[in-house]
Amino acid sequence: EIVLTQSPATLSLSPGERATLSCRASQSVSDYLAWYQQKPGQAPRLLIYDASNRATGIPARFSGSGSGTDFTLTISSLEPEDFAVYYCQQRSNWPLLTFGGGTKVEIK
Amino acid sequence: QVQLQESGPGLVRPSETLSLTCAVAGYSIRSDFYCDWIRQPPGKGPEWIGSVHHSGRTYYNPSLNSRVTISVDMSKNHFSLRLSSVTAADTAVYYCARHGANYYASGSYSYFDSWGQGTLVAVSS
């Protein structure tokens, strides 16, 4: 099983600041990695796929980078609606799909 | 517009079987997607339970393999989850979702691009 470790667990920032979230895989997943955003009471929403591609309708302030074992989700300037929990997920090891433990981006 | 909707009991007794159904609209289950079940215990990250393809291929998380059955009903355009011998550790929000079946394809559909709203299932006596 590929374990995805996200850091930090919580990120306290103010609107307008830059957010940098990390996801590290226990073995290479190539670029088969996605990022999701989840707000309370909602299902996760796909933001980034294949490490660096924005899904349909996702604002340009969201960007993803990395390959192999180290990945980053960057939110260039936090909007009020961006405060949420973010998860990474790999599909490299299909048919065993795994998620990270999440990073909560909270208002400072 | 793709829509998925879970339905089923919100309370299951310990040792019994959890059964949920996901109704699909906006696309055909006969298309080249896997139908997925994912769960999320309170305060934790999501956990993939398993997937079914209309061809009959099924894949399950090894941690649940012996207790899980996922099936598809193409006549009703829905798919189902059965989880047997439940305990309190199975209390979670259960989501249905989909992802593309071509492993080598590049695109958002290769990930969980559509989800149901989720349904909370509590295991308690």
Image (cartoon, rainbow, N blue to C red):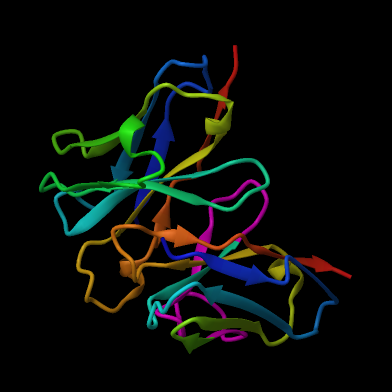
Q: Position of residue A71 (x, y in %)?
A: 54, 82
Q: Residue at 22% of width from left, 35% of height from top?
A: B71
To which quarter of the image does residue A15 belong? Answer: bottom right
Screen quadrant of the C terminus of chain B: top right
On screen, residue B86 above or below A13: above
Q: Residue at x 38, y 24 (%)?
A: B84
Determine whether A64 is above or below B94 in the image. Answer: below
Q: Is residue A48 above or below residue B43?
A: below
Residue at the (17%, 59%) spot, across then down: B32
Q: Quadrant of the N terminus of chain B?
A: bottom left
**Magenta stretch holds residue A40:** yes
Tally the numbered discs: 0
Of A73 and A28, the residue lying toward us: A28
Q: Position of residue A22 (x, y in %)?
A: 63, 78
Kindly tell me whether residue A105 is visible in this rendering. Answer: yes
Along the line of sight, the residue nearer the viewer: A89 or A2: A2
Horizontal side, residue A40 vs residue B41: left or right: right
Taking B24 as reference, is B31 above or below it? below
The percent coordinates of residue B111 (x first, y second) are 37, 65
Residue B6 position, x and y percent, is: 42, 36
Q: Residue at x 38, y 59 (%)?
A: A97
Examine the rendering and report whether any part of residue B81 can be seen: no
- Magenta stretch encompasses residue B89: no
Q: A81 or A86: which is nearer to us?
A: A86
Extreme-right residue of the structure = A108
Q: Which residues are magenta?
A: A38-64
Q: Extreme top residue here?
A: B125
